[in-house]
Image (spheres, coloured by chain):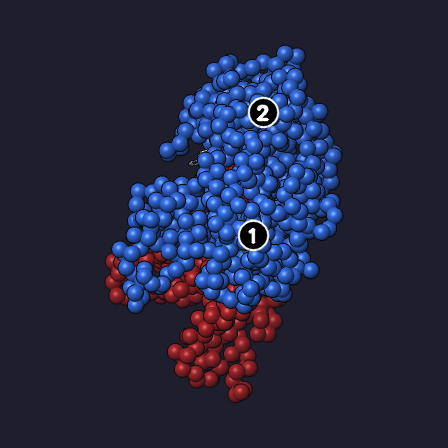
Chain colours: A blue, B red
Amino acid sequence: MTMASRPPEHATGAAEPIVVLRDITKRFPGVVANDRVSLDIHPAEVHALLGENGAGKSTLISILSGMQRPDAGTVEIRGRTMRIASPRTALDLGIGTVYQHPTLVPTLSVLENLMLGASWRAPMNRAATRARLDEIAALLGIALPEDAPLGSLSLGQQQLVEIVKALWRGEKVLILDEATSMLTPQGVEDLGRVIERLRDAGIAVLFITHKLHEAVRFGDRVSVLRQGRKVGSLSPEALGRLAPQEAIDHIVDLMFGGTADRTGAERSRAHRARAPGERMVIEVDGLRPAGDPDAAGEAGVSFAVHEGEIFGIAGVDGNGQKQLAEALAGQRGTEAGRIVLDGAAIEGLSVRQRQHAGLRYVTDDRLGEGTVSAFPVGLNLLLKRIGDAPFWRHGIIRNAEVERHARALIAEHDVRVPGPGTPLGHLSGGNVQKALLARELDDQPMAVIYNKPTYGLDLNNIHRARRAICERADEGVATILISTDLDEILELADRIGVMLDGRMVGIVANDGDAARRVGELMIGVGARA
Amino acid sequence: MSQGLLSDAFLISLIAGAVAAGIPLLLAGLGEQVSEKAGVLNIGIEGMMLFGAYAGFATAFGTGSLWLGFLAGAAGGLVLALLMALFCVRLGLNQIVIGIALTLGADGITALLHHVQFSRTYPRLPRVETLDIPGLSEIPILGPSLFARHPMVYVALFSVLVLTWLFRKTHVGLNLQAAGDKPDALDAAGISVVSTRTWSVLFTGVMAGLGGAYMAMIGAGIFVPFMTGGAGFIAIVLAMLARGRPLWVLIGAFLFGASLSLTTALQVGGVNVPTDVVQMLPFLMVMIVLVLFARRASLPAALGLPYVRGQR
Ligand SMILES: Nc1ncnc2c1ncn2[C@@H]1O[C@H](COP(=O)(O)OP(=O)(O)O)[C@@H](O)[C@H]1O
Ligand SMILES: [Mg+2]
């Protein structure tokens, strides 16, 4: 069912829409980010805008918030066509936006951040600002430390300051772009309560997310964007008629056009050719990564991974996963603990020595520490073997060997690239990840650590990367899979460890009940294992 | 040490010299501080000082008025700052490349203009009349060196207070800090990053021009090509180390001023040290200060980065 061609819907009974986007088109070099998208936003209603990464959600709302100009299409506010030329215009119209990327100044206090934006000639009126802050805080049902530097607040509190700021000049329309992406599960719950209060106060909320369950949980109305096009929407009445599971099935159909496999977990795990072996390949005992005292637990992290096993490490981002991965790979020192690879202690070895011993690390920072954008793909594929024979001899690079090696890997991993000489920076995100996987999985790894291997990829490349991970595990590679995407871990892992505040707070087998127990551990309510 | 070192003559000469050499650094350093706060690393400030020095000197020489000279100096700095703002803020070109180009250009143009106007002569301006502050100027040692100066000295000192107030108590201060630390936040708040930065760069030009004019008209009394001799770069260092506080620019400017004037002061005090050694002092000082404090310098997060709305 496609509703893109229908005129903007008018919900019976509900108030007239306060904002109507009509046939908005926005092109960037090489992509049509929005293709004739129409959207209604009603007062006292949460409109969830759902779509995968890159679907064009942020672009659409940046047009409404005055950050970008549409190439075609109109914006109507209360029935009148408006040109929103700048963020200020949008704010003056009562349209406040909480952007996906934080837009507060960490070095200014909460109060100063809220004063930002007044005319430079205006006197600085702290008392009035405080009063308005208290007013909005009361509306939201929250309290904020007004004079603390913003950078010292938790991400959840910073998010609330963003909302206060968005509502500052008039509480009519609030746009939230991926507002939950940095929050803990508890923070998401708190945000949910705030959103409900705002809706009940008559504010129109546009809630943007790429997470289906959030759209269903928060949205009174749901619209789905896919590759720049609106592929359908569910009115409040339609949503009310459907049972939750039916609604989800319906939306999944809209999002993925029926191509997605909803039973990914069963399919992927069934694809595993063999069960994990008995032999212990990696043993980590009491490991405490150096640095970042807040991210390193006292007791240290302990776990073991068998041959051919996928050990998933779940947890909300920033709970010490990256530190753990880097300590395992040798990029970060350790304060205590042992790492044993295939019977030999490796915690004293350098990055390079650990690689030679068979340990590989697929970083999540693909363009930062993972690759050199200006180098050709061929050289990037050998980045960790510079100087080694047969590609270098007596310090001189042998281009024929490098190219032969690159062509083989490019073919094997289906990296879409004109040739080994193309600078890696010209590749799309999915192909960069393919190249990175090709490099790390080359040359007989014994154990591989993946850090967020599918983060930011499109659906196709996500499946491809997951399949590559499974295939390697089937070949006997001991696999540590760090991911903040719980679905991914549930789909791939044999056992799941959960990290919280730098500690491994529990390890559970990936059976029917795993999702609930892992979820509890992630937010700190599960029993300690 | 010989008694000459602590003689009145030595101290008066040292403090007076510190002020004379420190005021240009103070003016330029305060200007640089404003544009750095807003996120623009103004390497062209050396050239702006030189423009100010030439324009100020030539005007004062022609009209006999120091105040017209200061006006011309400010205008001279402003002209280069307009170019800087156009290229680096409006067009988003690389601030370091443009800054160096402007400085090199100013070196050449002022030397050429000086040659055309004065050939190989270096005429002097008449002695500067001072504004003696009643009472204070009679204090021994400090009186003559601090409180019997050209009024511009007091203007420069006063601007430390003004900027401190501006940074702490006004929206201008908030806007500047946001433009340097998180420009997209300022933009999202409905304030133009480009115009905030443009104004800050123009202000830097005016301050640097005044500093250069002071250096030529009052500090030296003559104009010599390339006479700023790195003062602009010292001002950049001062602004970076001051972490956004005008008072620290003041302290730094006078410390550097004192080390610059040490040669003369030593000679006045009757101590003979090779001038080459003493002239190295300011630069030695820069290095020592950098080694000691550079790690503490916390620069605005977006310093040196052009801002383009909606770009990622
Ligand atoms: N400023 C920009 N310049 C070029 N391409 C852009 C820009 N902003 C977004 N895009 C592209 O537009 C598409 C939609 O992006 P976006 O709106 O951010 O998606 P979403 O928010 O749904 O993840 C993507 O392909 C993205 O790469
Ligand atoms: Mg987005």
Q: Which residue is mark 1?
A: A277
Tell me where residue A143 appears, x and y as whole percent.
73, 40
Q: Which residue is mark 2?
A: A249
Q: Please report, as a chain letter, where disc 2 is located.
A: A
Report crowding for label 2: few under 14, some 14 to 19, many 20 or more residues within 10 A (C-alpha). Answer: some
In the foreground, B10 or A440: A440
Is the CB–ligand 1 distance for label 2 below 8 Å? no
- In the rendered structure, which amino acid carries the disc numbered 1? Gly
Residue A314 appears anywhere in the view:
yes
The residue tagged with tag 2: helix, strand or loop? helix
Tell me where residue B195 appears, x and y as whole percent.
47, 41
- In the rendered structure, which amino acid carries the disc numbered 2? Asp
Q: Is residue A270 above or below residue A258?
A: below
| Direction from residue B131 to residue A371 in the image, left or right | left
Residue B110 appears anywhere in the view:
no
Q: Is residue B278 above or below residue B191?
A: below
Tell me where residue A201 appears, x and y as whole percent.
70, 25
| Direction from residue B28 to residue B123 in the image, left or right | left
In the foreground, B29 or A372: A372
Specify the farthest residue to the bottom: B2
Answer with the quarter of the image where residue B275 lies: bottom left
Q: Please report, as a chain letter, where disc 1 is located.
A: A
Report crowding for label 1: few under 14, some 14 to 19, many 20 or more residues within 10 A (C-alpha). Answer: some
In the foreground, A301 or B236: A301
Tell me where residue A91 appears, x and y as whole percent.
57, 30
Tell me which residue sits at (52%, 31%) in the image.
A261
Along the polypeptide, which appears first: circle 1 or circle 2?
A: 2
Tell me which residue sits at (33%, 53%) in the image.
A405
* Disc 1 versus disc 2: nearer the observer: 1
Q: Looking at the image, do the residues carrying marks 1 and 2 touch, with CB atoms under 8 Å apart? A: no
